[in-house]
Amino acid sequence: MTSSPLITYVELLELARQGEVDTVVCGTPDPVGRIVGKRLTVPAFTTLCVEGEGIGASTFVFAVDVEMTPLDLPVSSAENGWADFRLVPDMATMRRMPWEPRSVFVLCDAYEMGSDDLVAVAPRTILRRQIERAEALGLRFKFASELEFFLSSTPQAEAWRRRYRDLEPLTPYRNDYQVLQGGRDEWFISQVRNHMSDWGIPIESSKPEWGLGQQEVTLDYTSTLEMADRHVLFKYGVKELAHRAGLTCTFMAKPAIDEVGSSCHLHVSMWDLDDNPVSWDGTGPAGMSARFGSFLSGQLAHVLDLGLLLAPTVNSYKRFQPDQFAGTAIAVGVDNRSCAFRLVGRGPSFRMENRIPGADVNPYYAYSATIAAGLAGIEAGAASPELHSGNAWTDGDLATMTTSLHRSVDRFAAAEVARDAFGDDVFEHLLQSARAEVLAFDSGCVTDWELVRYYERV
């Protein structure tokens, strides 16, 4: 048996024979970035997934909102009977689950029933298509997600009963970077670091963040699809570990208007098909190569049109306040946190940090948007961008990130770069899903803000 967190099918059978494993969890990411799927016995996994054609599941899971409300989209509706698709395991992702020692987890791709075609609107498929577009140009990308989240000492069931109001933060006062607070939190954060590494998700570092009870964990960089997979598995794992520890965690972009938001900075570097780094050659601005300069110019030119995929919820836009380090000013700067795009590193480590996304982002969508914008710049032969110095937030000549989901949906609807990159079917699926989210907020809720503002005074 190997000591690697990842295991083969042969190793799975041996673990089952020894009585160590009896369950295989088969999952795939949904439009929110959650894992959906089924738990199988090992014999059923063999019959359905190894000897058979995969596990049947309803395409409904790709056409719902966060409340699991059906959205009546072309992929799944009453018109087509909410037709099934096939969950087909990507066997290279099979791994032991550290907090469920008798279970093994494997990520699946979504395939059409009766054909070898991937379901076009499945998040993993969408990202695969952008990876293929890049490889056709001789390029690959490596990503790293730098995630923040809040922890509360209020248990999850009690937090739900309170409707997530007045929760006890894990820390009583601000402790950004404070090693003392890191030691106090270590009883839980060490579980995150160690279990994630045991699950095949290497962790670079962790630290207390500025918010009360807020944490930052940085994942090691890797290839594009692998990083997106690690991202969603990390969030799944943190939530599971928090629940088992009697804590509540949130990856909301802005859980309270009087508190800092949680980001998901995306670190992106460019490589050729022989795995050589090609972001930096020492010749262009800050040493960037001409092709990486075109990639960066594509980000500046198209990020607002594709912003819906970086800021997918109504709540995402509450985080975009210039004095709280969110990437609102559309500019590129060297080690400049006031710019949406920050250049860091040198030589092989040279990369772009996209500071726009919050922790609520679906990485498959966000990575796809990043690649699509960059490829548009490369295909247009765009010149390397000028580098911004000083405070980008106060520069009135710079474009700024859209301030509402409404505006991002409108920009996306008119974006030819999005339709060209994703194709008509995927483009319309993403657009209709986002419009449904806007409608749910506009017509389906009364907020606390409205009650306080209008209850007595109108």
Image (cartoon, rainbow, N blue to C red):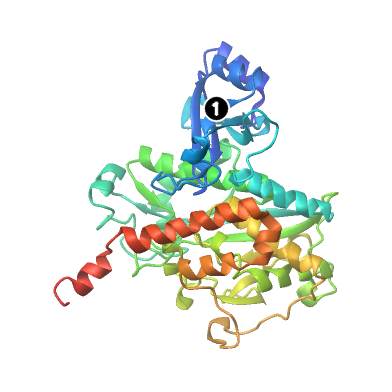
Whether residue 441 appears in this view of the structure is yes
Residue 436 location in percent, x, y?
Answer: 44, 56
**Nearest the eye: 110 or 75:** 75
Give the farthest residue toward the bottom. 396
Picture quadrant of residue 52 = top right
Q: Is residue 92 left or right of residue 289?
A: left
**Nearest the eye: 72 or 262:** 72
221 vs 82: above or below: below
Give the farthest residue toward the left. 456
Residue named by callout 1: 56
- Which quarter of the rendered picture does the N terminus lie within? top right
What amino acid does circle 1 point to? Gly
Picture quadrant of residue 226 = top right
Give the farthest residue toward the top. 17
Residue 46 location in percent, x, y?
Answer: 61, 17
Q: Is label 1 in a helix, a strand or a loop?
A: strand
Residue 87 location in percent, x, y?
Answer: 59, 31
Near mark 1 (Cα within 10 A), the count class, few <14, some 14-19 or many ≥20, is some
189 vs 49: above or below: below
**Nearest the eye: 317 or 331:** 317
